[in-house]
Structure formats: structure tokens, C-alpha cells
Amino acid sequence: MNRFQLFPLSSFLFSAAALASLPPATPQEVQPEIATGRSEIKSAVASKYMAVTANPHASAAAEQMLAKGGSAVDAAIAAQLVLGLVEPQSSGIGGGAFMLSYRADQKKLYSYDGRETAPMAVDENYFIRDGQPRGFLDAVIGGFSVGVPGAMRMLALAHQRDGKLPWKDLFQPAIELAQQGFEVSPRLHELLEQMPRVAVRPAISNYFFGKDGAPLPVGYLLKNPEYAATLRQLAKEGVRPFYEGEIAEAIVDAVQNDPENPGKMTRKDMASYRAKMREPVCSGFLTYEVCGAAAPSSGGTTVGALLGMLQHFPLDKSAVGSAELTHLFVEASELAFADRNTYSADPDFVEVPTQAMVAADYLAARAKLINPAKAQPASAGDPAGFADKRQVAQSPELPNTSHLSIIDQYGNGVSMTTSIETGFGSRLMVKGFVLNNQLTDFSFVPTNADKQKVANRIEPGKRPRSSMSPTVVFNKDGSLRLLVGSPGGSRIIDYTARTILYHLAKGMPIAEAIHAGNITAIGYQVEVEPEALADTELKRLEDMGHTVVQKELNSGIHAIALMDGKLYGGADTRREGSAVGL
């Protein structure tokens, strides 16, 4: 068995004050990600199956299912249940997810939408107080920010269609680990120490903090009997107790009766939640087909648009780490984000020009707006005559999130991104798991400066726009080539696109492409990791007219590349994930 597992134990860099002082609804200034330093490159090679997840415990759970003959979906469910225990700040059954599931027997890609929904009692002025949008942390903490969790119904739907093992078997690794305990990792400890206002409610404080108020130390054996009991019930009875039984009742009670910031979720909201299947968004890049999740995820259209514009330039003539390639990436990203910010929202409420945003002729025209030598201002285009429906959205859309990529022995693949939004979500903990704060992914204001309705405004039953970008890439002959995705708020899109660019266009091995310096440009400045560009190239980029900020960019890119009958896995060196396989 070929496996590689390594925890990054490097220094942590974060300013809690930056998040605490966040002005309302200004996503450009929201930078709460915690940089965990770097480990050595983390890779694995296999020929039968592979799992790459954000934590070695989750990778081991996925591998256990694969070794038993389970499908990629089976392994993804087992991994997610473990992630909710060992990486509770990032994802879990109290949140939502988007999954791409490739069925080799059908040669077809399916897209599952498990995004949270707004309670039916909200209105578009939900975030407005005294005529002004609420501050971010003021809105986040407590029941006010909790959307109806969608992950469990999505996982159940995917298992019904694409699973092989019995449902109850998928819960055993997480149940055993919750009972026996797991060691608090350096990353979890530092997040507890550095994230603002974590210990603000008794349940989360009693679980993660000692009697002296200090975060549990690294290496502390943390057990979660409540989570184990919850999982045992779900393993035995399916997801009904979560949406219609005592678990649903506990969630609604915590939301409605939060002492300082109650929300409006009801038992009916929980019972009526349904996961959805949507058509994946696919577009061309070089000789490949790049497929992602459709709206309310903005990942599929924005990753596709960014790469679709870049292919119109001689990418072979500019090197990784050069000002030229970085400039092209930045300009394409800003154009793609201009469209994303304007048009992406829940398609059940707002007409979204999905196919038009990634149409080849449209992207070719957008690419002509890029000056290879000089930075240009970016504005939204007019896909399919949508100019008169332009509705620029605002939403902070923060981490934390998690991504996993899995290939099973049957040739099936899963690329899944899962989230509770910001670190530790709403700070509400129920029956052993953390509840999301995904309602703050909606625009805090319902209209733009021209009094037009914002596409991503909150409405009853609506799903907030997301940047989660689970991606599956196919070769020209339709065979699987790459599964990839990342956490990172709106920066997910650039993390994912940059990895695809470096691997497919520049020929970098997938683990090296993941490890390479991140670059983001989401509409207001260019952010680059210190190792991304040499000082001379950085100066050249600035001379092209870019405002550049050097900073650690805490992605969590997890990918599997398929080449020459082998599986090549890579886990992001910025986090504690691992790649395992046989």
C-alpha cells in the first residue's frame, strides 16, 4: 500500500482583530483565514483507489470503505462524518455541501446540491438594523445566521443513487473515533485560540475549552459521546430524525431560543428541506472539459470562465512564477468575478445565465478585453442579453470549508466541497456538532446603488450563493483526468483554477501544482503568497498597474490526477490533510 500522511506543524499567522473590526457587508476586507505554514509536498501514487481529504483520520475512514468494496460516494460519506468530528471548525452535518459524482458504468457526471436554505420567516431586510446592514460578527454569532443544514439529505440522496455499502457501515469509523477520542491537532488548537469569539455559548465552550477558559491543548484526547449518539441514531434510522425528529427539534430550539441573537428557523423548515440534483456546468479548456457545480454555486461558471479566457493566450510562452502568466491569470480572474458577482445566485429564485457565462464565443470576446501588458478595469459582461438584469451582489462569504477527492476501484470519482461557512460557524453546538452560519453568504443589502434587486439577496427558502468549486476534468475522449477543489471562501475559485492551470497547461505534477504559490484576484487587489513570485517579477507585475499584497493564502487544495493508468494524489501542504491509496 502506498500512502503518505503528514501533519503540518508550522507556525500560525492570523489577526483576530481584522475580523472583529469588519465593516458590514464588505467582502473585500474579510480575511479571516489562518495560515498554518507549510509542510513538505504531500503526495501518493496508487493504481486501484485513492482518497485525499483534509485530515488523516478522514482519509483513513474513506480508505476503509474503499477497501471493503465501497464506492467513491460511500467513502466520501464516511470521510465527511469524520471531518465533522476532527475538523469541526470547517464542515460537518450541521452545514451544507456540493458534490460531483462520476459514475463510470454510465460514463456520466452527476451534481448534488446540499446547500443550506433560508427559513421561510425571513424577508429581504433580514440583515438591516436601523436602516443599516448589520456588522458581520454581529450577524454571525447565534441562531440568526443558521441556515437549514443540507449536507445529510444530500449525502443520503447520493448514497441512494451511487452507494454500494450499507448506510449504517459508513458511520462506524466516525462513531468509534468519537467514542475513543482523537488528539487535538495543532491547527484545531490554534483556531480555537485565534478565531474571535468562539467560546460565546455554553455547549461549544464546554466542549472545546478547559475550566480555566483556555483552548484544549495540542494532543488532548477529545471525546464526543453526543456526536457518537447522534451518528448511531442516523446510522440506524436514516436522516429522518435529523430533519423531522429529535435532532431537528434540538436544532430549531437552539436557533430560536439563542439568548442574544435568535433566528427564525422552524420545524417545518427542517422537515421541508430537500437536496437537489442539478446539471453540472462544463466548459472547454485546451483539449479538456472542465466541469463544476451549477448555481447556487458560482464555482462552475467562474472557474470555467477564468480558464476559458486564459486558453486564448500562448500559455506555453510564459512560465509559472512569471509576471506575464500571473498578469493573465489576474485579469481573467477579475473579469470572471465581475460576472459572478453580478449574475450568480439561487436559480430557483433568480434567472442565472449559466451556459451563456461559459459559452466559448462569449469567453473569447471577454478574453479580448485583456491587455497582455497592462492591467485593465474589470466590469460585468452581457451574457445572453442580461445587461438589463444586472444586480451586483455583496456577501462576505468566509472560510472555513473542506474539500475531498476520491476515486474507487470501479473508476467512479467524487469531488466534494463541504462547509459551515466561517470558522466554528454560528458558535452553536447541538448534539455534538456545530451549526453553520451560511445565511451570512447572502447579500446583507437587498438592492444595489441603483435600487435594483440584488440577485443574492436573502429570501424565504432561498439558497445563498457559494464559491464552493468541486471540479472534475475530463480528457478529450471523455475519460477522467482530474478531481480537484479547495476551501477558502471566494478565493476557492482562484485556488482551484490556478491548480488546474499549472497542472494541465504547464505540466506540473499535481502535488507540486498544489504546493506552488497561490495567487488571487477577486476584484479589489492582487494577493500573492511570498513564494509565488520573485521580487523582480513582483516589481514587473506592479509596473503593469497591479496593486499587489503579499500574504499567506490558506488554501486546502486536494486533488487526484489520472495518468497512464495511475492515480496521483496531492494534499495541500498548507493544512493537515493526507492522500492515501492502494
Image (cartoon, rainbow, N blue to C red):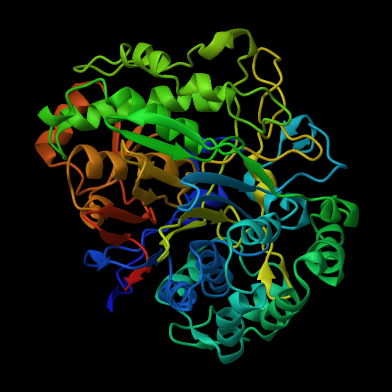
Residue 64 seen in this snapshot? yes
- Viewed as shown, does residue 388 lie left or right of 255? left
- Viewed as shown, does residue 177 lie left or right of 407? right
Q: Residue at x 66, y 40 (%)?
A: 464
Give the percent coordinates (x, y) of residue 327: 24, 27
- Viewed as shown, does residue 479 lie left or right of 442? left
Q: Dividing the image into 4 quarters, which one contains the C terminus?
A: bottom left
- Outermost residue to the front: 105
Near-viewer residue (30 or 278): 278
Give the percent coordinates (x, y) of residue 274: 76, 49
Q: Is residue 299 above or below residue 480?
A: above
Q: Residue at x 70, y 40 (%)?
A: 463
Residue 88 seen in this snapshot? no
Q: Residue at x 63, y 58 (%)?
A: 425
Give the image quarter of residue 249. bottom right
Give the image quarter of residue 419. bottom right
Q: Is residue 426 above or below residue 525?
A: below
- Viewed as shown, does residue 302 lie left or right of 113? left
Q: Dividing the image into 4 quarters, which one contains the N terminus?
A: bottom left
Give the percent coordinates (x, y) of residue 474: 36, 41
- Outermost residue to the bottom: 180
Near-viewer residue (316 or 564): 564
Give the image quarter of residue 149. bottom right
Number of marks in the image?
0
Q: Is residue 171 above or below residue 288?
A: below
Q: Residue at x 72, y 75 (%)?
A: 203
Give the percent coordinates (x, y) of residue 570: 30, 60
